[in-house]
Image (spheres, helix red, strand yellow):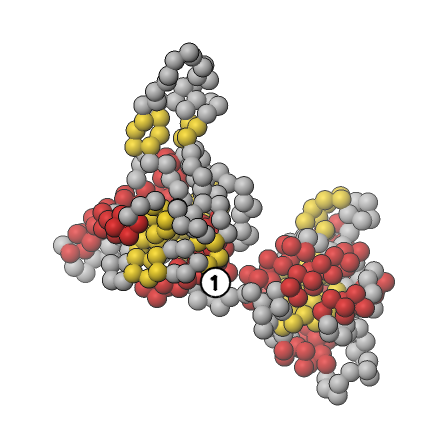
Amino acid sequence: MLKGKTIILGVTGSIAAYKIAGLASMLVKQHADVHVIMTKNATNFIHPTTFETLTGNKCLVDTFDRDFEFKVNHVSLAKLADIMMIAPASANVIAKLAHGIADDMLTTTALACKAPICISPAMNTNMFTNPVTQDNIALCSKYGMHVIAPAEGYLACGDTGAGKMPEPETLFEYLLKEIACEKDLLGKKIMVTAGPTREAIDPVRYITNHSTGKMGYAIAKRAMLRGAEVTLVSGPVSITPPMFVKVVPVCSAKDMYDAVMGEAMQQDVIIKSAAVADYCPAEIATEKVKKQDKDMAISLVRTPDILGTLGQRRIEVEQERSGAAGETMEHVPYLCGFSMETENMLANSRKKLSNKHIDMVVANNLKQEGAGFGTDTNIVTIITPEEQKELPIMTKEEVADTLLTVIKNQL
């Protein structure tokens, strides 16, 4: 995702400096061109050779180092950068950044850098909460630097509180958010539903399906990386939610209906990729149903039709518009549904597109190898009233990107 991107990592004198080796490794594995600049104090915690080995680039420390190509390094590197992240950022370096002090290679490069700059404070909790440090952090934010809130916990100094640098995996996600994708969905509000629903029989048992939520979660993450404001309405899954996404956890089909309908008309796009139960028990036992020496039947009733309700609302709004020229009418989002089939996939999916009055259906066949529940790949056909687009086997992230691009082009 980061091929062709140039990333500068600034490392300052904090015990957390050793963790940045892991971050550098993650970035290189994503094919980023990583350059590390260290303060002299940082070299007391981790040696520059470590970063040079990981990145394949010289680790810069001394502003006046003569052992480099004939060019002004702090300026040339700053021009190349797509982003600069200073992590860990000590109180001392934050103070310098806030007041434009450039007295070493790191702060000089930062002052010359026009690319986005992220700062991850890491220090003793009393230093972090000191009003002077807080004022300096506020100044950095005022000047357009993105300050990543430190984690709370046990610090190396023995104190407990705010001041821990987030783990490298978290810093990696911040970098992805900033530069991994073109922000072609910036300003759009997108709601995605994902995962299964659980329909209770009694306090112990429930009816559900095999959905893992992978497809919906991939769509939510890719939409976020492309700049959208994303709401993810998720049934019970074992996937860690993507960062920078509003997650609304739900359990039953009724829960999901309420969550979607509560915010539907504020969205630009709704993508219904959840595997919502079509039926639920007519009655939920308040106590565990005891096993008996005979068969048992459960009476089922239809669950609320989320996509059908949204499509019907569209019809109502269109009818109101036709009879109320010049009036400002209710906004209706673009509607995309998923159709998981085991037979007659195209015919059943086109029927769904028509019956539910929606803009798009993404169809796949559970019996096709490489598609369906729990896989990391999918094979889908994108169906709109105007066209039908069959996609080859792709990762679910690639399917998500293709789907979002088709939707963007129709908005």
Q: Amino acid at mark 1?
A: Arg
Q: Residue at x 71, y 79 (%)?
A: 74
Q: Is residue 264 visible?
A: no
Residue 355 x/y as whole percent:
22, 47
- How many numbered discs? 1
Q: Residue at x 35, y 30 (%)?
A: 280
Image quadrant occupied by the N terminus: bottom right
Residue 331 x/y as whole percent:
29, 54
Image quadrant occupied by the C terminus: bottom left
Identify the image quadrant of residue 239. Answer: top right
Looking at the image, the residue that sits furthest to the right is 44
Q: Residue at x 82, y 45 (%)?
A: 158
Circle 1 sits in a helix, a strand or a loop, which is it? loop
Locate residue 325 relative to residue 283 in the image: left or right: left
Q: Nearer the viewer, residue 302 or 395?
A: 395
Q: Nearer the viewer, residue 385 or 365?
A: 365
Q: Is residue 300 visible?
A: yes
Residue 172 x/y as whole percent:
63, 59
Disc 1 target residue:
226
Q: Residue at x 63, y 78 (%)?
A: 80
Q: Nearer the viewer, residue 70 or 188?
A: 70
Q: Nearer the viewer, residue 41 or 285?
A: 285
- Work out whether 5 lies above or below 262: below
- Work out whether 328 lies above or below 285: below
Looking at the image, the residue that sits furthest to the left is 323
Identify the image quadrant of residue 92. Answer: bottom right
Locate residue 303 relative to residue 197 in the image: left or right: left
Residue 197 x/y as whole percent:
42, 37
